[in-house]
Amino acid sequence: MTKSGIYWLASYPKSGNTWMRLFIANLNGEEENPVDINELQTGSIASARGWIDAVLEFDIGALSHDEIDQLRPAVYHWSATHTEVLEYHKIHDAYTRLADGRELIPAEVTRGALYLIRNPLDVAISFAHHSNCSIEKVINNMSNAEFAFCAGNKRFHNQLRQWLLSWSDHVLSWVDAEHINRLVIRYEDMVEQPLTTFTSVAKFLELTTDETSIKQALEHCAIKNLQQQEQDKGFKEKMAKSAKFFRKGKVGDWQETLSPTQIQRIVSDHFQVMQRFGYLDARGQPLVRPLVSHQTIPS
Amino acid sequence: MDFYKAFGLIISSEIMLPPLRLLQSRDAPSVDVTIRYGEIDKNGLKQATTTGLHCQVAANHLWLHVPNIAWFEVIDGNQIIVMPESGVDQQSIRLYVLGSCLGCILHQRHFLVMHANTIRFGDQCVMFAGASGNGKSTLAAAFHQRGQQILADDVSAINSQGEVIPSYPQLKLWHDTIKQLDIELAGLNKIRMQVDKYAYPLDNDSFCQKPLPLAAIYLLNTHNQENFLKEPIKGFNKFNPIKNNTYRPSYVKGLELQSIQLKLASKLAGRIYITRITRPNRLFQIDQLIEFIQQDMVSHGMAI
């Protein structure tokens, strides 16, 4: 029997999603050479205008963001039910409902959601580099319950509007979506315990769990190799205004980069979620290496 | 019932189509296309070749549902039927009549229909194609400001002689483009109340009213680098960019017009110049882009 349905690779921006997509591409390809970062063939991002446009077969350029959102659930449903293979799609939208109560991402075609979470102290730094803006601005965005990408209405956006909500709300929207099958993975565990972590991901996503294949895929998308590829030929997903996409990928960069005030602000904005996922110690102080025992969702 | 002219066709319409040139009935001796309200089966076509989420196509027949706006049928290259959803405004219906429906009519009438705009240069014209957001309309508006005549915005139709047929005298411009080009916003109407995009009417001097031979296609592209690139496309490689930039390729497939399109595209590829132009995506440096294109046109013997 053929399998179909969509696995969503969900995360707040700068939390390891591109790395995960490269891992999946390398694992699926099982080639001797790494997948070209500019030829990443995993499915479109959920907010890709081209995907929605191709399924609808009419112009959405003159529709408002809200009108387009009304059409999105049916498009995902159509795509999943008219493809006879499993699909893997990146998504930065929070898991939300439309004004009429329907889910933006229909549960019935969602085979699973892999949610990647990263310490917000490190997300803030990476996001600021990515957008070439101040860390203060990013901290404000991360605490803004109405934060969205591509939400302006005065020009064309290549992607559809994506409600990100606050960082905490984004995490909770996905990890507490109880009616969908989900696996929550911390970025820090991807870095610190790659083999175990990526093997559990591969199992969840119904990919090969062969150890040699996973090790080879991990080597192909090791940060130093991705940096080398970007240096050699650039990366098309980099924002024009940022210096490079594959920057450090480091865990705990916040210790050297953020001021005590910035740290305090992020911890106070996101205390509960940071604590739940092991980013704070018993006294509420931020940890460089997150606690081993934290609340995850069994797959 | 009013009479209009667009794409060289005389259109009679129960729906007002203000961007199009209005004709007196004596100037419309024979009608090519009729647009009228009528009953449409909400379930779609009985024998569709392709069935999509909201679009079904059979030979010579397109059925389209734009939720909350209307159902449309486009038949035999000469009929557009509209069944509006309740409470919908005329503007919204008009946009899809002039977009998807008229685009389909042109396919059915065996034009090579491109998702592109077309500008006059001397006695020829040049087409600018590329994905939405790559700057086609902004470029057209900027050429218009420099005194070039426009033949078509967004949808361009090429006849079997390789000429582009004038569409109708209007550009559609986003709010930010209007600001960037210092165009007066006051007095312009939104294309729909729900979006900040405007209809910019072209007067008789700004709109070319006769078909002109197509000399070149520029494929507009962007990248995250700071430089401009040009990449001439030669020989058989010219065929794919033409095919990839046709208007709604899924309609062509459903209408079973692929072989006709293939013939038109091959013939065109043999005689026109095609180049891909890549500009930085960070800022839309419109003056530099125009200069870059003009230099290329001059070096290939075209008038600017």
Image (cartoon, coloured by chain):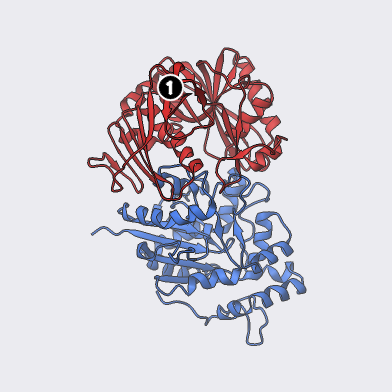
- Give the letter of the blue chain: A
Q: In this view, does A272 lie above or below B225?
A: below
User: Of B120 and A139, which appears nearest the observer?
Assistant: B120
Residue at 61% x, 20% y is: B204
Q: Is residue B148 above or below residue B196?
A: above
B23 lies above or below A158: above
How many neighbours does mark 1 have within 10 angstroms: few (below 14), some (14-19), or many (20 or more)? many
Residue B282, percent from left and from top: 66, 43
**Could you tell me which quadrant the C terminus of chain B lies in?**
top right
- Identify which residue is drawn at 68% across, 50% down: A243
Identify the colour of chain B in the image.
red
Q: Is residue A212 visible?
A: yes
> Is residue A30 at least partly visible in the picture?
no
The three-letter code of the residue at mark 1 reads Ile
Q: Which chain carries label 1?
A: B
- Name the one closer to the observer, A117 or B148: B148
Q: Nearer the viewer, residue B265 or B96?
A: B96
**What residue would you read off at disc 1?**
B10
